[in-house]
Image (cartoon, coloured by chain):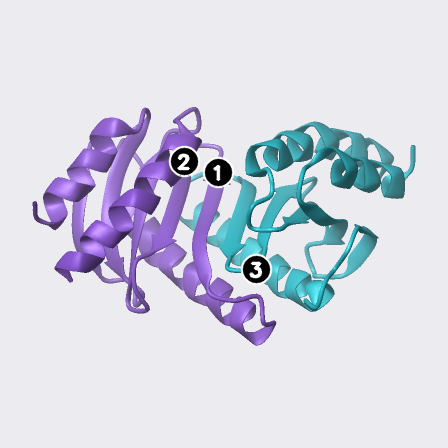
Chain colours: A cyan, B purple
Amino acid sequence: MGFREHLQEVCRKVEGAVACSLMGMDGIEVDTHLNDGGDLDFRTLLVEYSGILRSAREAAEANQAGGVAEISISTDKLLAVARVVSPEYFMVVALTPDGNFGKARYYLRVTAPKLLAEL
Amino acid sequence: MGFREHLQEVCRKVEGAVACSLMGMDGIEVDTHLNDGGDLDFRTLLVEYSGILRSAREAAEANQAGGVAEISISTDKLLAVARVVSPEYFMVVALTPDGNFGKARYYLRVTAPKLLAEL
């Protein structure tokens, strides 16, 4: 299975998922599976969220809280859950606000090592 | 019930909770109930996380994703879940990594309006 198939599988298994991406920490997208982006500029938002993930990592390191494993941001229109795959990459799944958050976290956790194995 | 009692109640009801705070968006603490801070400089981390919450809010607004309601950051040593109480305030609960994340989200959701009513 390639990157795309893993991302697609997460989208398929998580209720309410609209997109799943593998991203560089610099905000550059490696690959994305998009279910239905709606009217939201999902890609621009992801670039901004990668900056937030970097900030969270720096804050955690500076305060000896250990490495950041996961970050989630919930807005009125979108719930995004990001998980660190390696120091250079992270994956993120975007859900509708009523999407299955627990399942998103679970599938990110099990899929991240599979993506890492292919990097 | 004052601020402190509400924060204390969240700490008491959520398994693995170490602290619960009401914070200003500027990173200034209004009140905190601390169960057992461990060796972590929890307060400094909270100030940093309030900056992250601000960034997430700006990113979401700039991309028409709506207002940020909740953000969670999971590190090796700590899981922090923050919820916006008003445009000026948020509350955050910090858990051990094996703490009950779902319950933390639930109690933040039900407690935020109670805190808002007292602001």
Amino acid at pointer 2? Leu
> How far apart in space, not on screen, are marks 2 and 1 (Cα)?
5 Å
Residue B102 lies, with reference to residue A79, above or below; the image says above
Q: Chain letter of disc 1?
A: B
Quadrant that contains the C terminus of chain A: top right
> Image check: B73 left or right of A35?
left
In this figure, which residue is indicated by the disc labeled 2? B78
Tell me, yes or no, whether the two marked residues, 2 and 1, touch with CB atoms within 8 Å.
yes
Cα distance between the residues tagged 3 and 1? 26 Å
- The reply to whether residue B72 is visible in this rendering is yes
Position of residue A59 relative to residue B34, above or below, is below
| Residues marked 3 and 2, same chain | no
Task: Read off the chain for label 3.
Answer: A
User: In the image, which disc is placed on residue B75?
Assistant: 1
A45 relative to B113 in the view: left or right: right
Point out the image quarter for the N terminus of chain A.
top right
Q: Are marks 3 and 1 on the same chain?
A: no
Residue kind at label 1, given as amino acid type? Thr
Direction from residue B43 to residue A29 in the image, left or right: right
**Which SS class for mark 1?**
strand
User: Secondary structure under badge 2?
Assistant: loop
Provide residue A25's location: percent of width, then percent of height: 68, 55
Between disc 3 and disc 1, the foreground one is 3
SS under mark 3: loop
Q: Which residue matches tag 3? A: A77
Residue B16 x/y as whole percent? 33, 26
